[in-house]
Amino acid sequence: MRRFAMGFLWFVVLYFGGCMLVGGIAGGVAGANLRPGQDPGIAGAEAGSRAVERYAGVIAGGALLASIAGTTLGFLPGTGERRLAQ
């Protein structure tokens, strides 16, 4: 049960991290290509929002795949086998 909970936690972390990464890149590109008189904050927020909406399925699928693989194989922190001190 503990590994399942950690796997779910890693899914949430990876999903939100992926959303931040995709939205940040899209916002940065939109901020670099501004027209005169355009507000950079609004342009970046709109571009980031559109990009995350468009690629939400890909982000969720990648996060799910990485969290399942990482939890099953134990390479994500908190999901490995516990070793008892001897």
Image (cartoon, helix red, strand yellow):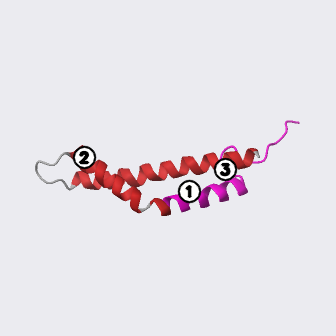
Please, what is the three-letter code of the amino acid marked with disc 3?
A: Gly
Nearer the N terminus, badge 1 or badge 3?
Answer: 3
Which residue is located at x 52 percent, y 52 percent?
15
The image quadrant that residue 85 belongs to is top right
| Structural distance between the alpha carbons of marks 2 and 1 | 28 Å
Residue 44 x, y percent position in the rendering:
28, 49
Secondary structure of the residue carrying numbered label 2:
helix
Please, what is the three-letter code of the amino acid marked with disc 2?
A: Ile
Which residue is located at x 49 percent, y 48 percent?
16
User: In this rendering, is residue 51 above or below 82?
Assistant: below
The image quadrant that residue 55 belongs to is bottom left
The image quadrant that residue 86 belongs to is top right
Secondary structure of the residue carrying numbered label 1:
helix
Residue 79 visible in the displayed image = no
Q: Residue lying furthest left in this view?
A: 36
Nearer the N terminus, badge 3 or badge 2?
Answer: 3
| Structural distance between the alpha carbons of marks 3 and 2 | 35 Å
Task: Determine whether label 3 and label 2 are within 8 Å by CB.
Answer: no
Which residue position is annotated with label 1? 63
**Was residue 66 drawn as part of the magenta stretch in this picture?**
yes
Which mark identifies residue 7? 3
Residue 64 x, y percent position in the rendering:
59, 58
Which residue position is annotated with label 2? 42
Q: Nearer the viewer, mark 2 or mark 1?
A: 2
Which residues fall within the magenta stretch? Answer: 59-86
Horizontal arrangement in the rendering, residue 82 relative to residue 62 (left or right): right
Q: Residue lying furthest right in this view?
A: 86
Nearer the N terminus, badge 2 or badge 1?
Answer: 2
Which mark identifies residue 83? none
| Structural distance between the alpha carbons of marks 1 and 3 | 10 Å
Label 3: how many Cα within 10 Å (few below 14, some 14–19, many 20+): many
Secondary structure of the residue carrying numbered label 3:
helix
